[in-house]
Amino acid sequence: MCNVPGVPPDATPPTTDDLSRMLNQVLDGAPRPAALGPVRVHSVATEVADRLMTAVATGDYLPGERLPGERELASILDVSRATVREAIGRLQAVGIVEIKRGRTGGAYVRTSWTEATASAVRRTLLPRWPELEQLFDLRCLVEGMVARAAALRRTEEDLAAMRVALDGYARARTLGEEQAADAAFHAAVLASTGNPKIVELSRDMLTRVSLGFPVEPYGEDDPEDYQRALIEHRKIYEAIEAGDAEQAGSLAEEHFTLTSDMMRAMLGRAQGRPSG
Amino acid sequence: MCNVPGVPPDATPPTTDDLSRMLNQVLDGAPRPAALGPVRVHSVATEVADRLMTAVATGDYLPGERLPGERELASILDVSRATVREAIGRLQAVGIVEIKRGRTGGAYVRTSWTEATASAVRRTLLPRWPELEQLFDLRCLVEGMVARAAALRRTEEDLAAMRVALDGYARARTLGEEQAADAAFHAAVLASTGNPKIVELSRDMLTRVSLGFPVEPYGEDDPEDYQRALIEHRKIYEAIEAGDAEQAGSLAEEHFTLTSDMMRAMLGRAQGRPSG
DNA sequence: ATAAAAGGTATTATGTTCAGGCCATTAATC
DNA sequence: GATTAATGGCCTGAACATAATACCTTTTAT
């Protein structure tokens, strides 16, 4: 379950001397290195770009769909239009959206891979891969935690919402329907924890893991992934309904390795054939 | 385990009509409300202030100790000295530190409550209490998750580090020693997950929960809390050593309710007797 | 008394964000 | 085909946060 994070085990186990030194440090209040590192703060534009990328990755806006207009986004996000433009410009730069002008203009989510996307994958993903592996691992754990809490807290209404999503998933025949049902199921599980902060955390993990690329079972990926996702969703639902926190947690941890698998596949594609 | 978050259950259960409408929404890709809300970004000064408050709350700097100088902090954090001053000014304003001038000057962590602190508690804590309850709940879950992962991943070296911290805790006779040992134990558990991102998440939760007030068993609190903490730490250690993820997780969730209990107590103090 | 080390203050420069207006482009509508 | 509306593209100026730098004041070790 989950991945083994990429921290190399210390080659030299602590000696007795080491241990007593540690003990002394603890007791004497010796020079503990303050856990303070460089501060880096997201600009508003970066934050907006992250949110939009996550919205696309989550399926809030499907391929071919249009994002809200610049003025509308500025109003929704409570930022200036210039900032929205800055953010959308980045989405365009990495090939997530395509800008159309004129009356029906706007930022449209691209349907397929572009050279810009592949190159963005190479530039963005490769250098940060070790960090990403850690984030995948953490996301598995977090989603397992969510499923555990859901199993212990879900109400009948929560279960009903999950069933609706599962039905939608099974009936879905188009890409969009599958994505929507997938998102609905995850949303229902999250909602059943009854804690909005948990929802925030989950979404934040998705943001950090996805970097704007469609990491959920979307896109041009192997249809087998959908089958796998559906089966796993059903199992997770059963565990949650049964109130079996252990089972739900384990299954969810397992389930979310799908994300890392797909990211690895994407990375392979981006390296293998540099076109789209 | 953990708290029941403050989300009132929906008074009206969904009807059959509701459910089919939901299903249609899922299948038709109906107007899904994009999960986009107003953007708010922390300033650098705020981020620095949060970090320093967390460092104090964690015990990196104990009461009576001096924080690094403004110039040094600016260097460590890679920000301008003006920003550091802005942040330290806030710590001073809420009574966390005391500024001394001259050659041995600097920001010294206050030992006891001040009127400024109590008033800051009233002004800051009260309005955000519902949100804080949600954060307490989430923190319980996260730390339970950490303990589970630790039980499954810990190495012999990790266990050794935990034992050292436990020994320090048992031997500690002064406030500072207890705090240091406490921090060391938590750090050891975190480290044993082998994933730096988990450490970040845990620290972030602490930051958001503490708001700069000493939420760990520090300060002038009931000595019983120390006993309780020591006993619980020992139990958690045993579960982690045994590799019993379930047990470790449950115990940790239980253990971290200490934080919310103490915050509630602090709130009571701040309301009850407005002096220090 | 002197020098060193710290906080306190002021100046200037830079980048980000906001607010507002105007232009260019496109497609729906008349 | 002309009009109009909705959109992205672009520009300016002000406000603000931050960085970089220098210099002053206070305190204490020497």
Image (spheres, coloured by chain):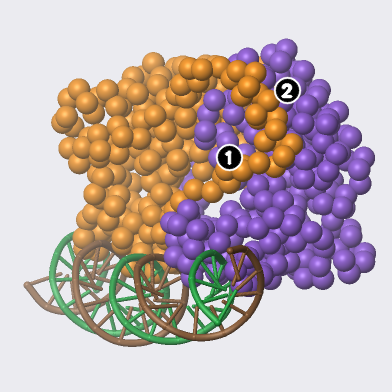
Chain colours: A orange, B purple, C green, D brown
Please give the chain letter of the residue carrying mark 2.
B
The answer to which of A42 and B216 lies nearer the viewer is B216
Residue A161 place in picture, x, y as percent:
63, 34
Location of residue A118 with respect to A54 vertically, above or below: above
Can you identify the residue that label 2 sits on? B163
Q: Is residue B60 left or right of residue B126?
A: left
Location of residue B196 with respect to A80 vertically, above or below: above
Q: Is residue A114 left or right of residue A58?
A: left
Report helix, strand or loop for mark 2: helix
**Spatial CA span between label 1 and label 2:** 24 Å
**Amino acid type at image mark 2:** Arg
Q: Residue at x 48, y 38 (%)?
A: A206
Mark linked to residue B201: 1
Location of residue A167 with respect to B17 vertically, above or below: above
Residue C22 image-quadrant placement: bottom left
Q: Residue at x 62, y 57 (%)?
A: B67
**Amino acid type at image mark 1:** Leu
Report helix, strand or loop for mark 1: helix
Q: For the C terminus of chain A, which image quadrant?
A: top left
Callout 2 environment at 10 Å: few (<14), some (14 to 19), or many (20+)? Answer: some
Residue B59 place in picture, x, y as percent:
70, 47
- Specify which label sits upstream in the sequence, 1 or 2: 2
Q: Residue at x 74, y 36 (%)?
A: A27
The answer to which of C1 and B26 lies nearer the viewer is C1
